[in-house]
Image: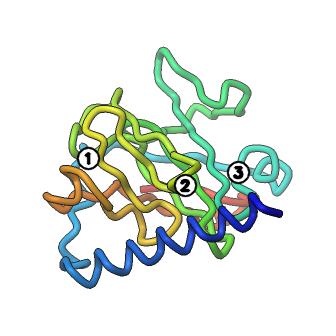
Amino acid sequence: MRDAVRKTVRALTAIAAALLLCGTAACDSIDDKRLPAVPVNVTFNTPAMWNTYGVSGALDTRRFILTRFERVPHDFPYAATTSTGFGGILLVCDYYGNPLAYDLACPVEARSDVRVEVDNESLLAECPVCHSTYAIFENFGHPMSGIAAERGYGLQRYQVVPGRADYMVITR
């Protein structure tokens, strides 16, 4: 119970910080297109597949990375048409239970091997190199601190939509 209260307080603090950022900076001036345009396509063919590999509830996260050298999650049934963007995909479930997706690459560093990591205490994604932080559970990947906030660089967003015959699809 105490952990749930702490998580709620942290979530409300993060929302307040995001609102403050929008009040003091132009929210519509965020540059979230700094990364190279790379194909994105991750398909969840069935509800069971989504239940296994997707995000199931508020503040849940999952990483998808498919390169010649990496396969995360290692047991995900990647198809020949699967593409995980520039640095990989960070799939999250926002405070309301909606899935959101971002490129894992830090837009400041703009390198496919420099990937943001989710800090479960602050509920933000942080770059391990420049230490910029991003609001991933609300405010659509907008920068919260660091060089990214100074320059207005947000995380690259991707669409998570129901597919025609598929359960969910992440695309550019």
**Pointer 3 and pointer 2: residues touching (CB < 8 Å)?**
no
Q: Residue 156 falls in which quadrant of the image? A: bottom left
Residue type (three-letter) at the residue carrying disc 1: Pro
Mark 1, mark 2: which one is toward the viewer? Answer: 1
Task: Determine which residue is flagged by label 3.
Answer: 54
Q: Name the residue rendered at 80%, 45% in the picture.
A: 52
Label 3 SS: loop
Picture coordinates of residue 54, whole percent (x, y): 70, 51
Task: Determine which residue is flagged by label 2.
Answer: 170
Front one among 99 and 45:
99
Give the residue at the far left of this rendering.
151
Q: Which mark is residue 107?
A: 1
Residue type (three-letter) at the residue carrying disc 3: Gly
7 vs 65, left or right, is right
Q: Image height check: is 92 above or below 114? A: below
Front one among 88 and 139:
139
Cα separation between marks 1 and 2: 19 Å
Picture coordinates of residue 50, whole percent (x, y): 76, 52
Disc 3 residue crowd, few under 14, some 14–19, many 20+, Cα 10 Å: many
Picture coordinates of residue 130, whole percent (x, y): 25, 38
**Pointer 3 and pointer 1: residues touching (CB < 8 Å)?**
no
Label 2 SS: strand
Give the residue at the far bottom of this rendering.
23
Cα separation between marks 3 and 2: 11 Å
